[in-house]
Image: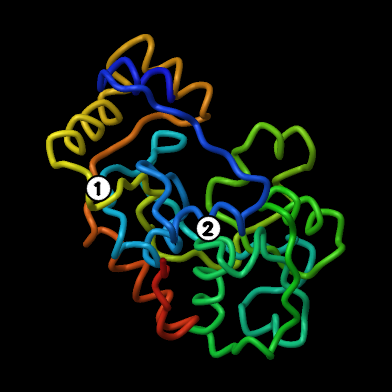
Amino acid sequence: MADYLSKKIGRKVILATTKDFESFWLGVTEQRYDIVHYNQYHYIRSAQSYQVITHIEEFGKSTIAGVIYVRKDSGIKALTQLRGRSVLFGGGEDAMISYITNRYLLLQAGLKKDDFKSLFAVNPPNSIVALHRGQVDASGAGDSILDLPLIKKTIKTDELVALATSAPLLQLPIAVKRSMPAPLRGTIQSALVDLRNSEAGNSVLKSAVMTGMGKAEDKDYDPHRKIVRAVLGLVEPAQR
């Protein structure tokens, strides 16, 4: 991706990585990065300093929904039956889809945070595998999780069922610093949206396990903001 963008915009694009999320977030708050790819919640928190320009697409879809899964043989037919039971979320408390959106589903069903036991897996696939093994009562992940080749190869996906599914939400954003000149911002946006229209671009998408990118603007993430406010209350913006 960095090499592709370097050629398209005529400037060297350097890939920056960090040892952990805390280091990455410090870089965001200090605006060290010109281009950032993170989740929807992270964008909302940093929107004062960063402007979204595109969203990703996976499996040909520009949206993703939160889903709470259970085993078919669990006897659980409604979210209210998770009261007092364990729910393993596929990520930490800042995971927009796996945790925040699925917490919203539970909240809508009348279940507050203390009404069930919250557990956290390193990632969504791990939470699904644990559910399949009967280690927890439910799993919080996204609606495409059962389509992942790794999951299909590891478990019998037909033994799991979606207990509840959220409304579709726009996929992960790519944002740039708001101080970036408009012409450069537009060039980067066009290069990303055009990825699917060239052999080189499709190669980048394939390596990133994506099927494309589409244009995005700040208001596209207002539905996410509504969910975040309901679950977490007022969100403190990233501070320099």
Question: In the image, 20: left or right of 37?
Answer: right
Question: In the image, 173: left or right of 132?
Answer: left
Q: Quadrant of the C terminus?
A: bottom left
For the point 45% across and 37% down, the residue is 58
- The residue under label 2 is which amino acid type? Trp
Residue 14 location in percent, x, y?
45, 28
Q: Quadrant of the N terminus?
A: top left
Secondary structure beneath disc 2?
A: helix
For the point 50% across and 64% down, the residue is 165
Which of the 4 quarters of the picture holds residue 72?
bottom right
Q: CA distance from mark 2 to mark 1?
A: 22 Å
Residue 56 location in percent, x, y?
38, 40
In the image, residue 39 above or below residue 155: below
In the image, residue 227 above or below residue 59: below
Disc number for residue 110: none
Closer to the camera in the image, 74 or 228: 228
Disc number for residue 25: 2
- The residue under label 1 is which amino acid type? Ala
Residue corresponding to mark 1: 216
Viewer-nearest of discs 2 and 1: 2
For the point 78% across and 70% down, the residue is 137
Secondary structure beneath disc 1?
A: loop
Residue 187 location in percent, x, y?
19, 30
Question: In the image, 199: left or right of 67?
Answer: left
Closer to the camera in the image, 96 or 32: 32
